[in-house]
Amino acid sequence: MNTITKKSINGGEFLIKETEAQDIFIFEEFTEEQKMMAQACQDFIDTEITPNIEEIDSMKNPDIIPAIFKKAGELGLLGISVPEQYGGMGMSFNTSMLIADIVGSAGSFSTTYGAHTGIGTLPILYYGTEEQKAKYLPKLATGEWAACYCLTEPDAGSDANSGKTKATLTADGKHYLINGQKMWISNAGFADIFIVFAKIEDDKNLTAFVVEKGFGGITMNEEEKKMGIKGSSTRQVFFNDCKVPVENMLSDRGNGFKIAVNILNIGRIKLGAGILNGAREVISQAIKYSTERKQFGVSINTFGAIKSKLAEMATRTYVSESLTYRAGQDIEDRINALIAEGMDDTQAKLKGVEEFAIECAISKVHGSEVLDYVVDQGVQVYGGMGYSADAPMERAYRDARIVRIYEGTNEINRMLMVGMVLKRAMKGEINLFEPAMAVSKELTSVPSFDTIDTSELFAAEKEVIKKLKKVFLMVGGKAAMALQDKIESEQEIMMNLADVMIEIYAAESTILRTEKLVSIQGEAACAHQIAMTQVYLASAVDRINAAAKEAIGSFTKGDEQKVMLMGLKRFTKMDLVDTKTLRRQIADYMIEKGKYPFS
């Protein structure tokens, strides 16, 4: 991979720059070693999770999840991102994404796994002193100790920095006494390590601490009764004069909010990966059931309505794969480039993820909503049986719902991604306003009708993507000028703009993935991936049109509105696609294979 080429595209710049297919990473490029690790993870799920899923979710045996957790540690699955010097495997960022992907089909355990390996372990890995790393990481990597992350409070959810938990220095200056309440803490019931965020005195920002359960002063409520992920431990945690040595402060005083933000960026893209195998599994089960289920004397998978559902489920999953692994590799490439320039490994990892925080948010939002769509349609394919707790769809449906909430709600993430783009533009980090002005001038000019060489695969689709980027520049640029510093309080417009961003990144990533796959396998071998790419782009154009139109209607009037609507019509013009035939082609192929066959 050409690091210099990759470095030239910064986070968020997909809105104004073109990317070549050969410059992105695609799922099909994972090495044999990475695939073997993924298979080992899948074998672990098939052996330890699937046969015990009822017992896990019943919570009648409180020892089962901790026991499975320790087995995962023995296999090395908890130390994927931990350097070898601390007892881990020291694997690449995209490899850790792949493992998160596979674990996503593990039901409640996926939450246990993600909370420990992500938000529980990474704050120490990225912000800990050498002494803290040496003391805690080996035990966390092997599963000897379990970790949890204590940020959310009853009155501090999305506004995490408003937390009221306090840390008070003792008279001898050797300890902090932590007092406060945290809620929705995954793994709390069996955790040995608590990453706790509290405010010292009247500090504006939080400070983070590594708290051992053995320090005392920690009590908990009973396990929360939840809609889904029932087998994961979720408790309220109370700190009552919890005595924490001063050397257990994580990073510097007041740096806790920055830690929380950066760790959540990683958590978001890991969630984007973490929905994928669950979606694939639901699709495969729906294919199998629709083959076996007979109505009117034939399998229901012969019906167009069912085929349409199966194909759309697969298409959206394929798209999420495409954008998530593109972003993951961009992060990894940036990390490697920064290290090559002499930056410390840890700082490079933090900076690499921070650079692509916009894409992390896109991955989380798109992935979580794809999973919701897939499980909802899975229930529908099963019909009445889908509503039965004896069938697999009921659990999948309930478990999926949380993903749109944790690691920042999708509403918060939508506003964050647009806010980050605008802030970077104001700082000159993204040259957004110059292209936006060019698009504004284009609105009052005579449109050009350049001939497109349709003999080249995706030439027409790439032209559509270029025009869709103009939609964002047109609407986002006008909104920024009209509303100025009030734009972030116009949450509906921010979410409209976010939807445009998400669909552009998703559609472009899919085109690039399929184009690269064709260059490797040939066009004939990729007919179904091409079909999915075309189906998704057609629907993405419609969704962008609807979101942009709603935004335009909310802050423009008169002639300006008419001009923008004419521009929107021009920029979302696309030849009609026979999505019915393409979806049938996709569904027939999957039915023949008996599963989701695209990764």
Image (cartoon, rainbow, N blue to C red):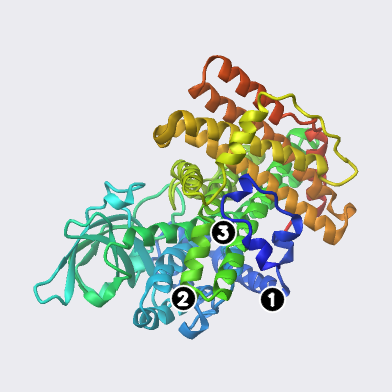
At label 3, which amino acid type do we have? Answer: Gly
Q: On the image, which quarter does residue 432 sit in?
A: top right
- Along the line of sight, the residue nearer the viewer: 322 or 280: 322
Q: Is residue 104 left or right of residue 442?
A: left
Is residue 211 visible in the rendered image? The answer is no
Closer to the eye: label 1 or 2: 1
Pick the quarter of the image with the C terminus: bottom right
The residue under the point 55% across, 25% down is 552
Residue ID for mark 2: 70
Q: Position of residue 554 (x, y in %)?
A: 49, 23
Crowding at dot 3, Cα within 10 Å, few <14 / some 14-19 / many 20+, comes out as: many
What's the distance in space between the residues labelled 1 and 2, CA to CA? Answer: 23 Å
- Along the line of sight, the residue nearer the viewer: 343 or 261: 343
Residue ID for mark 1: 33
Residue sitting at the far bottom:
85
Q: Position of residue 79 (x, y in %)?
A: 50, 76
The residue under the point 50% across, 36% down is 495
The residue under the point 82% across, 43% down is 459
Mark linked to residue 104: 3
What's the distance in space between the residues labelled 2 and 3, CA to CA? Answer: 18 Å
Is residue 92 visible in the rendered image? The answer is yes
> In the structure shown, which secondary structural element does the residue marked by tag 2 occupy?
helix
> In the structure shown, which secondary structural element does the residue marked by tag 3 occupy?
loop
At label 1, which amino acid type do we have? Answer: Glu
How many numbered discs?
3
Q: Position of residue 383 (x, y in %)?
A: 63, 37
Residue 402, compared with residue 342, is above or below; it is: above
Residue sitting at the far top:
558
Closer to the eye: label 1 or 3: 1
| Mark 1 or mark 3: whose residue is earlier in sequence | 1
At label 2, which amino acid type do we have? Answer: Lys
